[in-house]
Amino acid sequence: MNSTTTFLSSTSSYIETQWQAMFEGRNEALVTLALLFISHEIIYFARCIPYLIADQIPSLQKYKIQQKTIQNTAENQWKVFRYVLLSHFVFELPMIVGFHPVAVYFGMAISSVPFPPLSKMAFQIFLFFVFEDFFHYWAHRGLHYGPFYKHIHKLHHEWSAPFGLAAEYAHPIEVMILGTGTIAGPLMWCYATGDLHLITTLTWMTLRLFQAVEAHSGYDFPWSTHNWLPGWSGAEHHDYHHMAFTNNFSTSFRWWDHIFGTNKKYIKYKERKAAEAKAKKAL
Ligand SMILES: [Zn+2]
Ligand SMILES: [Zn+2]
């Protein structure tokens, strides 16, 4: 066993012991509810902090995707923070309450240990990313249809130059529809194979939150995910959707927009920007 393997296995057994202790002698549904809700709050808001710090650092402003439209003001961030927090308690909490009975019905392992091997978790999470992206692509396109846009999705588009906190700034119906894409993958997988652990679902939800906040951050740093992970959408992709109110409907990957031709305006825009930058350099 090399040192990395030893470290991973001792870390994993430590987390397994804590996991077991967390459930022992307690109501499994209540522990699951608290775990999901509290971790959602911590992960979502903590993931926004680096971007809030970046807003205060002048030398990082060159990485802001939209230089002309400035919406990440303290006033807007405060407004969005209050709305999102309220939405978490009023709309998302009841949905999380329903999670445990549904997950148990579909056969998800909740409090049991050992955890699945990392390779299995990674494979399942990759499948959930692919499913969510496909679901989100079509649901999001549907939300751009006239009346749906007007009554539901317009709220999320209040920000044409979004910032991290705005990721979950959305109408409750939209939260429900798009949230389905996040949870339906694990439930369907569980139903089909009977082989899924809550720790995998929790890790998937964490990564999905990371993806959503990054996509709305408004920053394209050299270290941003799409700059080292081929095909990843990231802020550079989703920011255009908020700026232009069209194209780039997917969440995690760029392939569906490419296959269904909903990235044509975005590509033209990119070409125009590149030509402008080239002409500026030549001056
Ligand atoms: Zn949209
Ligand atoms: Zn968005």
Image: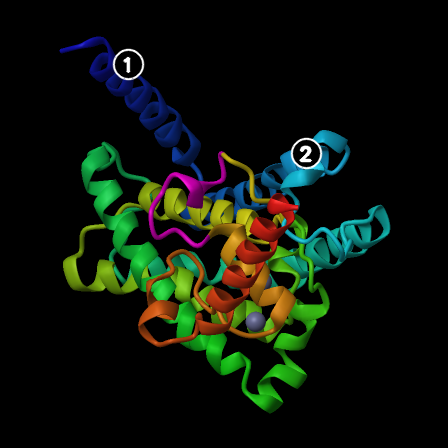
60 lies above or below 130: above
According to the picture, the residue beneath numbered tag 1 turns out to be 7
- Residue 27 appearing in the image: no
> Which residue sits furthest right?
75
Q: Is residue 56 left or right of residue 35?
A: right
The disc, 1 or 2, on the residue closer to the chain's N-terminal end is 1
Would residue 80 be counted in the magenta stretch? no
Q: Is residue 172 left or right of residue 262?
A: right
Q: Quadrant of ligand 1?
A: bottom right
Residue 196 is situated, as x and y percent measured from the top left of the image, at: 24, 50
According to the picture, the residue beneath numbered tag 2 turns out to be 60
Identify which residue, 108 or 213, lies in the foreground.
Answer: 213
For image coordinates 70% across by 53% down, the residue present is: 85
Q: Secondary structure at mark 2?
A: helix
256 lies above or below 93: below
14 lies above or below 39: above
Q: Secondary structure at mark 1?
A: helix
Q: Which region of the structure is painted magenta?
A: 223-233
Q: Residues within 10 Å of mark 2 (few under 14, many from 20)?
A: some
For image coordinates 39% across by 51% down, the residue present is: 232
Residue 219 is situated, as x and y percent measured from the top left of the image, at: 61, 45
Q: How many marks?
A: 2
